[in-house]
């Protein structure tokens, strides 16, 4: 799988990509993530990529030309499954979208906006999918692009050390994850649930499932309703 991220602030996205699971996934060759500095595609000697809003009003708008040149140059190299624009009015990012993108395993472009966003013609003519990471406004798309890349990369087979680990995470089966414990068995008189120390795997599985359902009922009851309405 390959993800090309287009940004005016490469530094902002490089750090989250160069540690831990994302780094390992790239080192193992399971995913390639390339960051492209949009300023390099500016035709202007000041490397300008934004300009005033037509019609007036506060805030700058990212120009179509450098973005078009950057996307065209990438498309000339290979085919892309989606050209994604990070945008607060896009479809809300969920685990199901991460699964879908990881399963396809193809090539993605992620465009990060800044300022007031991008010239609408970019969205009309280049973007195939718009993703929001939640109902709040960030100053740029980079953190969102890092969120999407991380959530997708860890689902690619072979990225997580323990193959089954992603499957037992929250949302993967429509439930949130059960509580987890590690050593010591007792701290300050606070004990680990006995069943987890029993060595009885079927009992442990049953307990975990029960806890997942209980937690989901308490914290995210709408997930259970969604699952019911799908059945
Ligand atoms: N004027 C725009 C916000 C621009 S914020 C509006 O009101 O909708 C600048 C950039 O940050 C956006 O172009 C987008 O790429 C990114 N961004 C901001 N909030 C985001 C969110 N919730 N999800 C994904 N990207 C976001």
Image (tube, rainbow, N blue to C red):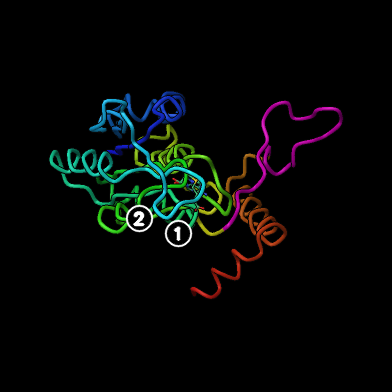
Which residue, given by chain and number where applicable, does mark 1 sit on? 91
Disc 2 versus disc 1: nearer the observer: 2
The quarter of the rendered structure image containing the N terminus is top left
**Bounds of the magenta span?**
175-197
Residue in the image at 53% along x and 75% along y = 229
Residue in the image at 33% along x and 32% along y = 48
Cβ of disc 2 within 8 Å of ligand 1? no
Question: Magenta includes 127?
Answer: no
Asked if residue 65 lies left or right of residue 130, the reply is: left
Q: Is residue 164 visible?
A: no
Residue in the image at 26% along x and 31% along y = 44
N-terminal of the two: label 2 or label 1?
Answer: 1
Q: Residue furthest front?
A: 56
The image's mark for residue 123 is none
Q: In the rendered image of this protein, does residue 67 appear above or below residue 226?
A: above
Q: Circle 2: is it few (<14), some (14-19), or many (20+) Cα within 10 Å? A: few
- Residue 24 x %, y %: 38, 26
SS at mark 1 in the image: strand
Question: Magenta includes 177?
Answer: yes
Image quadrant of residue 7?
A: top left
- Residue situated in front as seen by the camera: 29 or 120: 120
Image quadrant of residue 150?
A: top left
SS at mark 2 in the image: helix
Q: Circle 1: is it few (<14), some (14-19), or many (20+) Cα within 10 Å? A: some
Residue in the image at 69% along x and 27% along y = 183
Mainly helix, strand or loop, the magenta region? loop
- Residue 8 x %, y %: 38, 32
Q: Is residue 43 visible?
A: yes
Q: Are marks 2 and 1 in contact (CB under 8 Å)?
A: no
The image's mark for residue 120 is 2
């Amino acid at each position: 799988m390959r993800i090309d991220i287009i940004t005016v602030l490469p530094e902002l996205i490089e750090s989250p990509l160069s540690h831990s699971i994302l780094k390992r996934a790239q080192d193992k060759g399971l995913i390639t993530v390339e960051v492209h500095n949009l300023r390099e595609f500016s035709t202007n000697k000041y490397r300008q990529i934004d300009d005033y809003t037509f019609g007036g009003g506060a805030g700058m708008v990212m120009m179509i030309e450098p973005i078009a040149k950057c996307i065209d140059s990438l498309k000339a190299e290979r085919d892309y499954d989606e050209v994604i624009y990070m945008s607060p009015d896009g479809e809300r990012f969920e685990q199901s979208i991460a699964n879908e993108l990881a399963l396809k395993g193809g090539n993605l472009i992620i465009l990060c906006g800044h300022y007031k966003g991008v010239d609408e013609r970019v969205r009309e003519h280049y973007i195939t999918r718009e993703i929001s990471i939640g109902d709040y406004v960030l100053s740029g798309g980079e953190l969102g692009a890092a969120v999407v890349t991380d959530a997708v990369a860890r689902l690619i087979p072979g990225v997580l050390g323990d193959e089954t680990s992603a499957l037992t995470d929250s949302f993967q089966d429509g439930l949130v994850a059960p509580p987890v414990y590690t050593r010591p068995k007792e701290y300050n008189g606070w004990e680990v649930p006995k069943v987890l120390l029993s060595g009885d795997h079927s009992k442990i599985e049953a307990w975990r499932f029960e806890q997942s359902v209980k937690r989901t009922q308490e914290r995210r009851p709408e997930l259970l309703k969604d699952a019911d309405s799908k059945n």
